[in-house]
Image: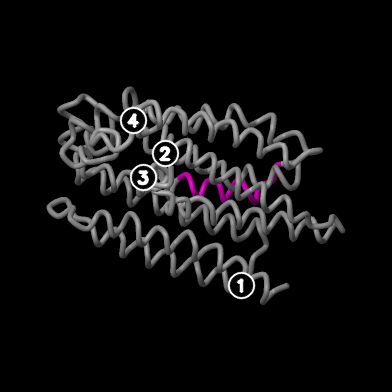
Amino acid sequence: MWSWLTRMLAMIRFSHTLFALPFALLSASLAWWANARESIPFRPLDLVGILLCMVFARSLAMAFNRLVDRQIDAANPRTATRHIPAGQLSVAGVTLFCVVNALLFVAATAIFLPNPWPLYLSAPTLVLLCGYSYAKRFTWLCHYWLGAALMFAPIAAWIALRAELSATPVWLGLVVFFWVGGFDILYACQDAEFDREQRLSSIPARFGVRGALRLAMLSHLVMLACLLAFWHAAGLGTVFLVGIGVVAALLAYEHALVRPDDLSRVNLAFFHVNAVISIGLLLLGWADHLVTG
């Protein structure tokens, strides 16, 4: 059982939960600070609920993607060694893992009761997450379907804690939307030729690697504009504003790593730089709050 679980966590790259989780925690922190100003007490159980929902939702989405794409992965030399094509995990085992995580996600939303909105929105959220796995079969905008799925992390955290929607989590969600869309385009450049051969839709397959890199850069420029709008809407201070400049430098470095004639450093750009950006924005939000109160 331990060996099976280890392989399962490796397949879904559990450590990459860090990409979306910091944005949910930043949104939650802002919601808790807003609640405190209204004398609404902090509930430790809410933090547990956010962590559980993020883990179960992300685990389901990743496992479902590997399950749906197993034949495509087997045909692609870059992904043929993934766990299902390589026979390290069975279709039945991964299916069971998906079902369990879906049920646990819905159950975890009940933690936020008497606020009913997380429970009401749990099923549509799962449909959006799992639907991404089919997007590249019919639209080259699939990268932004992934962005839309992850943008709901900060929005959902805010709704769970405030039972309302405001500009602050929406702007943060748009930051995630354009950030994820941009770096997913970069990552998909590795498979541009394969996608064309298999008639799969992606921006690199449609516009070529050079065009895709330009669109990814444009997406990240829009992300920075949304980050400035979020900074203003959230009432954050100088610390976070300086941090936006650092994020801009990191994005410039990320794009400098990837060139049309050299995609060898895509994984460095995709995993390392983006992990620094997501965790860094969370820490900057906390630091800004400590400084400005």
Q: Name the residue at 52% across, 52% down.
A: 226
Magenta part, dominant SS: helix
| Camera-nearest residue between 34 and 19 | 19
Question: Label 1 is placed on what type of residue?
Answer: Ala
Alpha carbons under labels 4 and 3: distance apart: 11 Å
Whether tag 4 and tag 1 are in contact, CB under 8 A, the answer is: no
Question: Label 2 is placed on what type of residue?
Answer: Met
Q: Circle 3 sits on which residue? A: 7
Q: Answer with mark 4 or mark 2, whichever residue precedes in sequence.
A: 2
Please tell me whether mark 3 sits on a helix, a strand or a loop: helix
Please tell me whether mark 2 sits on a helix, a strand or a loop: helix
Question: Label 3 is placed on what type of residue?
Answer: Arg
Q: Answer with mark 3 or mark 1, whichever residue precedes in sequence.
A: 3
Front of the two marks 3 and 1 = 3
Q: Circle 1 sits on which residue? A: 287
Q: Which residues are magenta?
A: 165-177
Alpha carbons under labels 4 and 1: distance apart: 45 Å
| Camera-nearest residue between 240 and 187 | 187
Mark 1: few, some, or many residues within 10 Å (few <14, many ≥20)? some
Kindly identify which numbered label has been placed on residue 141: none
Asked where in the image residue 230 lies, by quadrant, the reply is bottom right
Alpha carbons under labels 2 and 1: distance apart: 32 Å
| Outermost residue toward the left in this view | 261
Mark 4: few, some, or many residues within 10 Å (few <14, many ≥20)? some
Question: Label 4 is placed on what type of residue?
Answer: Ser
Q: Answer with mark 4 or mark 3, whichever residue precedes in sequence.
A: 3
In the picture, measured across the screen, residue 189 lies left or right of residue 153, that is left
Horizontal and vertical percent for residue 120? 69, 29
Q: Circle 2 sits on which residue? A: 62
